[in-house]
Amino acid sequence: MSTTLPDAAPASPGGETPERRFPSAPLFLSGPAALLFAALVLTPLFLTALLSFNQFDYATGRTGGFTLEHYLAVVTDEYYLEIFLRTFRISALATAICVVIGVPEAYILSRMSNPWRSIFLLVILAPLLVSVVVRAFGWSMLLGPEGPVNGALIALGIGRMKLLYSEGTVVVALVHVMLPFMVIPVWTSLQKLDPAVEQAALSFGASRATAIVRVVAPQILPGILSGSLIVFGLSASAFAIPGLLGGRRLKMVATVVYDQYLSDLNWPMGAAVAVILLAANLIIMLTYHRMVEGHYRRRLG
Amino acid sequence: MSFLELKNITKRYGPMTAVGDVSLSVEKGEFVSLLGPSGCGKTTTLQMIAGFVEPSAGTIRLDGRDITRAKANSRGLGIVFQSYALFPHMTVFDNVSFGLEMQRVPKGERKPRVEEALSLVHLAPYAKRYPRELSGGQRQRVALARALVIRPPVLLLDEPLSNLDAKLREAMQFELREIQRKVGTTTVMVTHDQAEAFSISDRVVVMEAGRITQIDQPYRIYEHPETEFISRFVGKTNLLPGKVATATGAGATVSLAGIAVPVETAGLSVGETVTLCIRPEKLHLTAPSGGLLTGRVADRFFLGSQWLYHIDGPLGTLMVVTPNDGSTPAEQGAPVGLEWSPSVVRVHRGAMAEAPDVALEVTG
Ligand SMILES: Nc1ncnc2c1ncn2[C@@H]1O[C@H](COP(=O)(O)OP(=O)(O)O)[C@@H](O)[C@H]1O
Ligand SMILES: [Mg+2]
């Protein structure tokens, strides 16, 4: 307009903010959730930790008292060391593959236009509606000696291969189960991305690949980070998949805990293994988080 | 032949025509604005020049070269996005340097050029900051520096100032123009704000529902709007429906609710339905008996440098703007006279689309 009305600044009421009036409001409001968390998560954890220090005798069972022998046994026994290493190796591999598959998948998804985007999002999420146990059985039928995969291999003249009960199978099945947990956080951070930022990179002469690597990827790093943490944590404590596809020999930590509790009935030992898994998981995830996010904190806020 | 030429550019989304048959020639060094209400296809037009939207029909030529189907990353244009689209994970320096890097400018040469661009927009001390550590106006300048540093043949600005507050917007308008004059880059700006378009453009292109309705210098668009839509969209105006009463060779008189008003438009025929447009600042208040019309002050608004009056009279409510020259303004309810010179009356043939909404015109 050739003439402009002076902008009437909205009079800010000089009243108090809710925080000032009820200084303890945040405490009260988060109280119920905190209580629930304490009751359902911290209590069992605490009991498990206590249990892991109890003495155990095969003849008499759990006897109470205090001992560090289970921890010592786990730390010094090569059998356990191997299982821990295998667990983290398999989890890291599954996480890496989830990043390699899930990030491009999320990117392509975010570039699709409706209705295809909704359809594919549903396809990605649908497996979550099926129990992990059912999916593990699906893999075991697929890869079993008489399964369709071996059938195809025989038909191609390659011959029957032993696919079940190998690390590779466990990794493949874990990737299948965990992929949505990677796609969703990455997709969410892609949603928050201003599409013009990628266009800006293109307008300066960047190729599409350069634009993705230099401009898109760094901005969705927080999404990749949270996806990785979820996938790694869930994989390292996965039970059904290694239990059903790893068989009796290929044990992971969660299956060992199960064995200790239910086969050996050595609850304190099982508890000690579980506590060590939790601690190791925490340390690995926190280190990873620090490494990646510390690098980007100032930039992305 | 002009530097940037759009010829019959059309963009259809399904059955909807977002941009229809747009032709525009921009000379080298010229500052052209696309002005129109939201949704009229300005951004789509700009995106077709930029290469992010492919035209359904028509050709775009830049410096004689057909770039209609060229990829966006091969056009080398400088673009300032409405959201600025800065790279949030890069410092201001790296943001500006990015385009040079993509053009494979040697590292030693990049630094002085980035610094030059940053000092052009007065941001040299902020080179090491990240975008989120800057204010809106500063981000806007980074976006401008980033687009200018690659020395583009054409600079494209999509609503570059719309995210700034009113005061800063006005300051940036003039700065934008000054910078553009200094570097001499051919510029196409998109805006829905006519003050912005008028104050800094060499020519303004008015768009309406995907089509261009007038291309002219800002002053001419304001004084000689070719359609009633433009006279309403651009500035405030009084629209008065009437019928031609008498017509001579050089002029005519139009009867408005029984009052004869002389106009200077030739070629009108007696009995024709017309709409008269008179800008509020072209109306003058006089003593009640002295004017062409009489009325009463229904309302008055103080705008700082001007007074805006709503005058109730035989033709309905008219808007009048007078400069605030320090004299006592007319009181509310006071009888006043109105006069104007016949040369300021614009005549649009045909009836008005709808009754002028006075309240809307004031806030608009
Ligand atoms: N990708 C698209 N798909 C469908 N319609 C679109 C698309 N982009 C823009 N439009 C439509 O084209 C018209 C013009 O849009 P736009 O150029 O953004 O307007 P402006 O920038 O003038 O506000 C609008 O009606 C808008 O809804
Ligand atoms: Mg727009």
Image (cartoon, coloured by chain):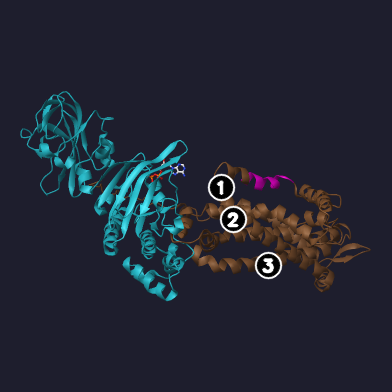
Chain colours: A brown, B cyan
**Could you say which quadrant of the image residue B230 lies in?**
top left
Other residues around mark 2 within 10 Å, as few (<14) / some (14–19) / many (≥20): many
Residue range corresponding to the magenta coloring: A121-130
Quadrant housing residue B329? top left
How far apart are labels 3 and 1 at the CA level? 35 Å
x%, y% of residue A69? 83, 71
Circle 3: is it few (<14), some (14-19), or many (20+) Cα within 10 Å?
some
Question: Are tags 1 and 2 found on a single chain?
Answer: yes
**Mark closest to the chain's N terminus, 3 or 1:** 1
Residue found at x 22% / y 38%: B237
Q: Magenta region's main secondary structure?
A: helix
The residue at which mark 3 appears reads as: A284
Verify whether residue A126 appears in magenta. Answer: yes
Give the amino acid at mark 2: Val
Residue closer to the observer: A43 or B347: B347
**Circle 1 sits in a helix, a strand or a loop, which is it?**
loop
Q: Amino acid at mark 1?
A: Met
Check whether the beta carbons of the residues at disc 1 and disc 2 lie within 8 A of each other. Answer: no
Residue with the mark numbered 2: A186
Q: Earlier in the sequence, mark 1 or mark 2?
A: 1
Give the crowd class for mark 1: few <14, some 14-19, many >=20 residues within 10 Å: few
Write down the residue under mark 1.
A112
The spot of residue A293 in percent (x, y) is 57, 66
Compared with B321, B89 (above or below) is: below
Q: Secondary structure at mark 2?
A: helix
Ligand 1 neighbours mark 2 (CB distance < 8 Å):
no
